[in-house]
Amino acid sequence: MATSISKLLIRLQKFSSKISKVVDATESFNVGGFYIQDLSGWDSAVVQFGTISAEGTITFYTTNDDGSVNAGQLLPAPEVPDNFIPVKGVDLATKGDVLVASNDSIVEFGIIGKYLSLSGDTIVYPLSYAYVLSKNTYSTPQEAYNVGVLQGTEIVYTTTSTLSNSNILFADSRLTQPIYGDGTSWYGISLLTNDSVKYAITIDGEAAIVID
């Protein structure tokens, strides 16, 4: 059985501009038994752990390898983090270095790799479906729907073969790297294997989509 947790909150901090945001990773972690956070642009991550299931542990890993450069393939290829190594965080209660999470603890990660992985004992990668998402954005949903996927695309993934407002789009097939937008620009998107399954959507700063 995959490790589960009652609450998993990640506070991302940027000291120079005195800004931060909190990511609730609880549901995502409990689905797959792991969570990967991209730390690009942030100075530190402070992770709050709730109660961890009795049969599981959560171990910390990091990597700089986003999988984007492979045999001459350059960005903006889909990012699939790989080659993780163990990393220590600082338990804010004890000020000691830790490799594994404790119940009801808060752990800070400062200068580490590009990605932070919080990994349970068993990882279950969810079934994913590939879509093509327009690289360009549009001011109206009609324009996005009509020409979006004809003017340059990138491959994205989600959990269903038809979209609803509850879906989140991801940059990788393991569904670990959400795609964010400004909440106002429109994208065209269609199912990779069936371009008649087609939508105009917006994506906001929390990765939530809205379908026209």
Image (cartoon, grey):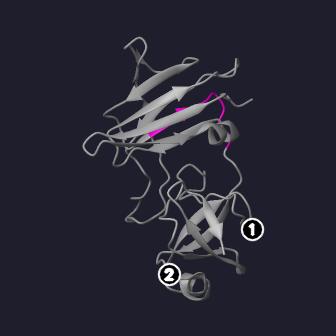
Q: Is residue 41 visible?
A: yes
Indicate whether residue 118 is drawn in magenta. Answer: yes
Residue 145 shown left or right of residue 12 in the figure: right
Q: Position of residue 185 (x, y in %)?
A: 50, 73
Q: Amino acid at mark 2?
A: Ser
Q: Is residue 117 above or below residue 162?
A: above
Q: Residue at x 45, y 64 (%)?
A: 77
Q: Position of residue 112 (x, y in %)?
A: 34, 35
Query: Which stretch appears magenta?
Result: 116-124
* Residue on which the image places disc 2: 139
In this rendering, the label closer to the viewer, 1 or 2: 2
Q: Is residue 195 above or below residue 96?
A: below
Front residue of this view, candidates 183 and 100 = 183
> Which circle marks residue 17 in the picture?
none
Examine the image and state in which quarter residue 194 appears. Answer: bottom right
Mark 1 or mark 2: which comes first in sequence? Answer: 2
Q: Position of residue 142 (x, y in %)?
A: 61, 86
Q: Residue at x 64, y 22 (%)?
A: 52
* Residue on which the image places disc 1: 162
Q: Residues within 10 Å of mark 1 (few under 14, many from 20)?
A: some
Residue 163 shown left or right of residue 184 in the figure: right
